[in-house]
Image (cartoon, rainbow, N blue to C red):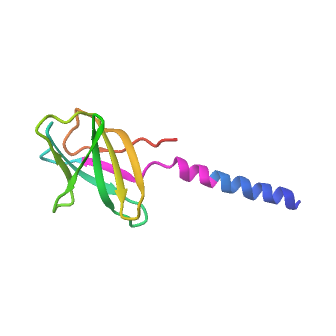
């Protein structure tokens, strides 16, 4: 009897871990007014235990370029040449959480549209 109880507890814990592991990322990217092929302005919402974004970068070819956080709270990057999409991002939070999201914002983005990264399993 005790053995089956332990197995049940182990199964429940495994299920909870699997659900948490497969949950969608707690981040979304909204393309703000002023964005164009050479200037990307994003409102990034991150909702995980009160943590906030410390650093956000955009991948262009093989390089990661930093976005700057403006007074409005939007993150932005300006370039002399058109930025190459679809756009891949990586970030670090104040608590040290790091993640990379590929192909989040399409090259033909729409102002005001919110894009959510796919959950990776």
Image position of 52 with respect to 60: above or below? below
Expressed as whole percent of the image width and height from the top left, the position of residue 110 reads: 21, 38
Task: Give left or right: position of 38 versus 117.
Answer: left
Q: Can you tell which quarter of the image residue 88 is in?
A: top left
The residue lying furthest to the front in this view is: 63
Which residue does the image show at 19% across and 50% down from the upper left?
76
Image position of 67 with respect to 103: above or below? below
The residue lying furthest to the bottom in this view is: 50
Expressed as whole percent of the image width and height from the top left, the position of residue 25 reads: 43, 50
Q: How many marks?
A: 0
Residue extent of the magenta highlight: 16-30
Expressed as whole percent of the image width and height from the top left, the position of residue 111 reads: 19, 42
Residue 40 shown in magenta: no
Task: Give left or right: position of 40 versus 15.
Answer: left
Expressed as whole percent of the image width and height from the top left, the position of residue 23 reads: 50, 49
- Quarter holding the N terminus is bottom right
Which residue does the image show at 62% across and 55% down from the upper left?
16
86 and 5: which is toward the camera = 86
Which residue does the image show at 17% across and 61% down from the upper left?
72
């Amino acid at each position: 009897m005790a053995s089956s109880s332990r197995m049940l507890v182990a199964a429940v814990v495994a299920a909870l871990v699997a659900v948490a592991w497969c949950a969608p990322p707690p981040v979304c990217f909204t393309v703000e007014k002023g964005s164009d092929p050479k200037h990307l302005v994003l409102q990034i919402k991150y909702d995980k235990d009160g943590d906030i974004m410390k650093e956000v970068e955009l991948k262009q070819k093989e390089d990661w370029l930093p976005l700057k956080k403006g007074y409005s709270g939007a993150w932005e990057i300006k370039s002399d040449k058109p930025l190459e999409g679809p756009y891949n991002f990586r970030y670090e939070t104040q608590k040290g959480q790091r993640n990379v999201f590929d192909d989040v914002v399409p090259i033909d983005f729409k102002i005001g549209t919110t894009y959510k990264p796919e959950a990776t399993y």
